[in-house]
Each structure stands twice: as C-alpha cells, then as structure tokens.
Image (tube, rainbow, N blue to C red):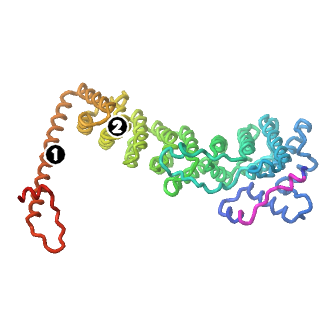
Amino acid sequence: MLRQILSKLPRKSSKTDSAESARPESPVTQQISNGSSAGSGKSSNGPKRTSSVVFPASVVAGIEPLVPFKDVPSAEKMNLFVSKVSLCCVTFDFSDSSKNTLEKDVKRQTLLELVDFVAAGSVKFSEPAILAICRMCAVNLFRVFPPNYRSNSSSIGENDDNDDPMFDPAWPHLQIVYDLLLRFINSTCLDAKVAKKYIDHSFILRLLDLFDTEDPRERECLKAILHRVYGKFMVHRPFIRKSLSNIFYRFVFETEKHNGIAELLEIFGSIISGFAMPLKEEHKIFLWRVLIPLHKPKSVGIYFQQLSYCVVQFIEKEPRLASMVIKGILKYWPITNSQKEVMFLGELEEILEAISMVEFQKVMVPLFWRIGCCINSLHFQVAERALFLWNNDQIVNLIAHNRPVILPIIFPALEKNAHDHWNQGVLNLTLNVRKMFSEMDDALYLACLDQFREDEERQSVLAEQRKEAWQRLEYAASLKPITGNTAVLVTPLATSIAC
C-alpha cells in the first residue's frame, strides 16, 4: 500500500514550469523540481522514489513511515518525522469522495500524527525536516484557483447578500495542513535563522496568492499564518509589506477584484500598531498611496471596517496625519452612493475624535461644506448620520471653538432642512442642532439668520430677473416671421402676449 501511495508523488508539467519561471525559485521549489526530474528517468513499472537531495538515503533509510512516534527511540523521531512528511506529499482528487478512500484516510491520520508531534515540541527540527515540511506544504497548498465567474466589483455588500462563498471540497484535508504549518512556525523548536532559507520570498509570494481563495475558512487560516511569519522572520518584514502594497495597488488601480482584501488589511492593522515612532516615510507613503485610494472601489463595504481601523491606527500614531487623511477622504467622497456616504461619515467621526485643534482648523472649511451637503441629502440615512455628529461631545467642542467659521457654512443647510425636508426624524434633528447653535452664540446665530434671509431675497430677485429675461426673448421670437425650415419655440405665454 505504501508503494501505491508513493507512486502518486506529483510531477511538474512543462507548462507549469514555464508559467512559474517568472517567479524567484526558492530551495523548496527547486527541490520539488529536482524530485520530479529524478523520478522521470525511472521505469513506470517500478516504485517511484523521492529525490535523494530532498530526503537523503542515510536519513530515511529503513524507517517505515506508518510506525507511530511512540514506537521509535528519541534519536530516530526526527528521521521518522521526515519519512512521514514525505508520505504526505502525495496529493489526491477530493472532488470525488469515492476515489482513493483508503489512501486519503492514511494520509489524514499521518497528518494528524504530525500535528500532535509538532505541538508536543519535544525535538528540535533539523534542516532536512524544515525543508521537507516546507516542500510538503507547498505541494498540498500552493495551487491556481479557477476563474471566478462572479464579479467582486459589484455594489457594496452585493456579494455578501446575494452570493454564497465557494467552499473547497478538499478543505477537511487542507485544514490539517494549515494547522500543521501554523504550529510548525509557532514552535519553539524551529530555528528561524535556518527556516528563513526555505520560508523565503518565493514561499511568501505563493502564500499571499492563496488569499484570493473564495473559501473564507482558508483565508482565516492564511491570516493567522502570515501574521506569525511576519512576527517570527524579521528579515522578511519589508518584503511582506511591499508585497501587500502591490496587491492593494493591483486591486485599486487595475482589477478591483480580490477576495482577501479584508483579511490583508486586518493583518496590516496589527502591523501598524507595532510601528515605531516617529513614523518612517515609507509608512506615510503607504497611508497616502494605498489606504486612502482604497476608499474608491465600489466594493469598499466588504473591507471598510478593516480599512477604517488601519486609518485610525495611523492617526493615533501620528495625529498630524489627520488633516491629510480628511483631505483624501473628501477627494474620494461618493456623489451618488448613499451607502458609502453613511460609512464615510462614520469614519470621519472616528477621525474627528482623535484630531487636534490645529489639524482640524486646516480642513474645517471643505469638511463642513461637505457635511452641509450631506445634511441636505434627500436620503434620510445620510442626513441623519451627518446630524448625529452633533451628538459627539468632542466634535461639538471643536465646532464651538470655531463657530464663527463653521456656522455660516452650515447655517443655510440647517434652514433649508427646517423648512423643506420630508423626513420627520431629520427635521427634528435639524431643529435640535439649530437650537444648539442658538444657545451656543445667539448673536452669531441671529447674524447668520439675517444673512441667510438677505441671500434668499437676492436669489429670489435674480430668479425673477431670469424669468423676465426669458419672457422677453420668447416675445421677441414670436414676432419674428418664420422663414424656410427655421424651428421656432411657441409657448402659450408668448402667444398670449402677442394677442
């Protein structure tokens, strides 16, 4: 039975080799290729053997991989570990549950044994063992996903409401492999200085590619693993940040299609919390060129919570960035998408809670002009969310100290709502805010009211003048004789004047 399982060791096709040639090859990838080429010279009638480069004969010779760990002496446990890992390099088709049931069960039991052995942490991992487990994880996990027939660039939340996630039929098997990899990286018996040769840039890139899976369970496992890799391998941290930036760039400026943006942002949120002060220029560039443009895609609702958390983390680290962030949000402010407006207003409230007075004064004019537009929105949720800002004591304090500038900007919107808005809830909130301003500074409030009335009268006079001008034009046109095929607008008003 062991020979039957080992005969299923995977081979790389020439097409796959050419497709992957653009990626930097890691020792793990090279050893997979060497193992395949070594087996290609053997007769198809004999059992296929693993490459001696990956599993040296002196290490695994005479070790039966199905023997339990408890039945071998401590000196041989690492050799047995390598032998069992090599057994798990066999892959199966899980789309048909009736095929290879016995072999799948043997592999599953072996993987569970490996998980328990790694969790016990009784033996320090040797370099051949590290290479072997990295190779096994690469064979089992790294794969190309089929084309997605659904679009991730649809409107906010549409994917969540109308489409169920696609679950991989091999997940019960993949979950054990992910669990093994996570425990392996977390293990105190793993020497990071040795492991970094095999968990290298190529390995990390392939790991990041898996975040595009539609299976949310797999993305959760990947999130935990990448977080541990970032924490354990300090030498790879700049590369991981750069690779994450490239994924975000591609998503925002090219495809707007990726299943794992929320999970990647969640990872980056924990990375931001560990940034040293003062922030490096590299991190500020990431905020301006990546996080702010991520407000633009239509599918922002899927990952908005994680995005907002990252932005607020930056501002808590360096409050001077608040004005820059608000300018960026105003730049990408939605015009016709009410759901996005509600979310943006919520994010603005979080930022204003942490902003300093100096930074607030830099952006208060364009900010409250936009808030005034939201107050006048016919969508009651947008108007309500904008008016709810006055329920926040910190924001009210900022407004109170700058009321000579803010009230003249916001007053026309409040007055129009008080007279014309159709929603009773919005009307009540508007009256409350207007009363708050009146109690805050009655003289300024009355001055703004007088100015508003003057502006209304002026607009009324201008509207009347425009109407009279159009009447004169229509009358003049009605007196001109019609010649040829000239089109003439004849209105009832012009006809009655002519009569």
Above or below, 219 relative to 142: above
Query: Does the stretch in magenta take in 289?
Result: no
Badges 1 and 2: C-beta atoms under 8 Å apart? no
**Quadrant in which the C terminus is drawn:** bottom left
Query: Does the stretch in magenta take in 8?
Result: yes
* N-terminal label among 1 and 2: 2
> Horizontally, is 163 left or right of 222 in the view?
left
Q: Where is residue 309 in the image (x, y as percent from the top left)?
A: 50, 38
Name the foreground residue: 144 vs 324.
144
Crowding near the residue tagged with mark 2, few <14, some 14–19, many ≥20 C-alpha atoms within 10 Å: many
Q: What residue type is labelled 2?
A: Ala
Disc 2 designates what residue?
A: 383
Q: What stretch is highlighted in magenta?
A: 3-16
Secondary element at image label 1: helix
Disc sitting over residue 389 in the figure: none
Residue most toward the right? 62
Q: What residue type is labelled 1?
A: Gln
Q: Where is residue 187 in the image (x, y as percent from the top left)?
A: 74, 38
Q: How far apart are marks 1 and 2 (CA)?
A: 25 Å
Disc sitting over residue 459 in the figure: 1
Name the foreground residue: 383 vs 112.
383
